[in-house]
Amino acid sequence: MSVAYSQQGSVAVLTIDNPPVNALSVAVRQGMIDGIERAIADPAVAAVVVIGKGKTFIAGADIREFGKPPQPPRLSVAIAALEASPKPVVAAIDGVALGGGLEVALGCHFRVATPRAQVGLPEVKIGIVPGAGGVERLPRVAGLEAALKMIVSGDPARAPQAAKLGIVDAVVEGDLLTEAVAFAQRVVAEKKPLRRLREVPIETGGKDWRALLASARATAAKQTRGQISPQRAIDCIENALTLPFDKAFAETARIIGELIPSEQAKALRYAFFSEREAAKLPDIDASVQAKPLTAAVIGAGTMGAGIAMCFADAGTPVQLLESSAAALDRGLARIDGLYAEMVQKGRITPEDKAKRVELIAKATSYDAIGQADIVIEAAFEEMGVKKEVFAKLDRAMKPGAVLATNTSTLDVNEIASATKRPESVIGLHFFSPANVMRLLEIVRGAKTAKDVVATSQVLARRIGKVGVVCGVCHGFVANRSRGQLTREANFLVDEGALPHQVDKVLYDFGMPMGPFAVADLAGIDVSWRVRRSQDATRPKDLRYSPTADRVHDAGRLGQKTAKGWYRYEPGNRAPLPDPEVEAIILQSSRDQGITRRPISDDEILARCLYASINECAKILEEGIALRASDIDVMWLYGFGFPRWRGGPMYYADTVGVAKVYDAVREFHRQHGKLWEPSPLLAKLAESGKTFTGR
Ligand code: 3H9
């Protein structure tokens, strides 16, 4: 039964029952129509409550139905039936009312919600627009400005905020169904007029709607650069303002009809499901119990401080350990400064700051953290240091504690060997800045126990990260594959391109920054140190670009010295091309005996991206990543790869694996060994298959 019909006194109750999230599959749509018709026809029924079974009202249209031939009845027909009811219809919202779920609620005459409920129209995030009346009705209930913000960002509002905006009529404590039925009975008793939102005018709050729309367009163009759906949603809102309800609705239906099969929407749906898939591991099911999660972090440097902030931001207490009180104070001062910046920017209140700072407890001895359930080491990136720390942790931590290392390159198995409990050791690789970037690479060592992996996944969720599990190799999945992009970017500069040309191509593709701007942000000395650590093992016959070393040796360490691959004006992070760097580059090309040539944007894009894709394929065939989609999730959350392109693996599928393979073979011919094609890439290309099943 997708919609159960029952009665409480004179109130009919339609209970949406479509686990796990009450998505609006065809049976639910039909069930709502049948239910409302039955209630209208029954003289013993005076009002109707629509409620979701379980912890969710309705998560929206069934995204799995998109791209398949639509099956009647349409959602809008079911919603129209609710709205047209001559008997009052009350939506009772717990959990989430998202997308079509909120649209159902807005079709009802009244809405009551629990305090924890959330309502929103996240359609733009999956590349479409709200297509069942949300665009037209939300501005009518919440006013133009608030609706514009919610629809264009796709972000939900919590019940108290929704009540302030008028989206929810009452926030109720206690049993939701009881309260909703009582609310419905009051509506009947007080003969309250039924509020059909289609009949309500849109309030602009006295503001010029054209200016509001223009500003929303500009914000969306910045925040979701390259993505079509937010702009199309604004088109729909403009129609809602200028056309009669039904005409505007028909236009929205046309627009969503175009968007659903679009490449962007397909990629965004793929990203949605990939993210959920990444949480599933074939050998770890619900029977593997995660451990509790009191946490400690070792090292109050940039990374350690950022990791501690992740816990504090999630409202979870954390201990921060440093070897000396002075180092600890420096770390805490850094944290204080970062929170102060957030207060200044209006992102958190001074009270939030105080609460968060208070959640970070000081520790200067291993004994002090011994009872933590999970400890994350963020000490200096050097094997000797790591092993020393882990030997100490082995002695200090209680049995069963998870011992995690935040290494970005070192062998987790070797680190684990410094303990007598390698089964408790795991890599938890945060991305910089740790309190901002959402990827958490969960690196499973050869001996890591299943419950340690499961605990790390739970931890990731708890602190708002997207955890993706992978195996051990140098650089793990994300940095190893991204490293190839940087490699080619450097070679391209040696061959004739300039940093700003390379960066522009990747920025225009949709990356948040190009590789040279990233290098300046991260610090040229950081990558210089990594290269030095590889000098002894780097095969002599491999091509190596000395240019980045020369930039480093010229004292250009990036943004921190106001010069790196670019120069920077005081107080400004905008990268400016610098003739001094150009001179270094030209000299480096000459010294390498390279005759510089004009390099096309197409070549830049292909070399940078295909180098990474080829490496991703190697990572997949080595079994370091479980699925192509896991790699994509890592790039989306670790490097800001444009979500509407799905990720590098999905992108390779859209280009065509055979085309990518041909290009890789050609680059191999031209540039040699580093372009050795991945056998998996070759196999897929030759058999006409894809990485992602696209
Ligand atoms: C829409 O409504 C268009 C309309 O305007 C009408 C147009 C005509 N469909 O995330 P979780 C699955 S567009 C199908 O792990 P949580 C999900 O894949 C829709 N399946 O749980 C997963 O499956 P599995 C607008 C869905 O508690 C399982 O449910 N709505 C849908 O962390 C559990 O999900 C959205 O975009 C769906 N709509 O978070 C909301 N939603 O177990 C999308 C979820 O096989 N959903 N599943 O992996 C969400 O944001 C979160 O899933 C939610 C729950 C907050 C609901």
Image (cartoon, rainbow, N blue to C red):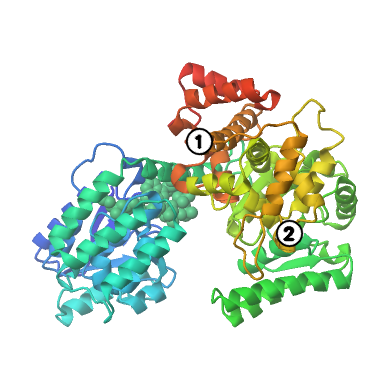
The answer to whether residue 470 shows anywhere in this view is no
Q: Residue at x 63, y 53 (%)?
A: 517
Residue designated by label 1:
602
The answer to whether residue 233 shows anywhere in this view is yes
Q: Position of residue 90 (x, y in %)?
A: 24, 68
Work out whether 682 lies above or below 649. above
User: Which of 72/684 is in front?
Assistant: 684
Q: Which mark is residue 162?
A: none
Is ligand 1 closer than 8 angstroms to the Cβ of mark 1?
Answer: no
Q: Which residue lies most toward the top here?
A: 686
User: Which of 255/442 is in front?
Assistant: 255
Is ligand 1 closer than 8 angstroms to the Cβ of mark 2?
Answer: no
Quarter of the figure that contains the C terminus: top left
Work out whether 449 lies above or below 292. above
Residue designated by label 2:
303
Q: Position of residue 522 (x, y in %)?
A: 70, 55
User: Which of 23/500 is in front?
Assistant: 500
Q: Residue at x 16, y 74 (%)?
A: 194
Report the amino acid beneath label 1.
Answer: Asp
Position of 367 compared to 490: left or right? right
* Quadrant in the rendering for residue 270: top left
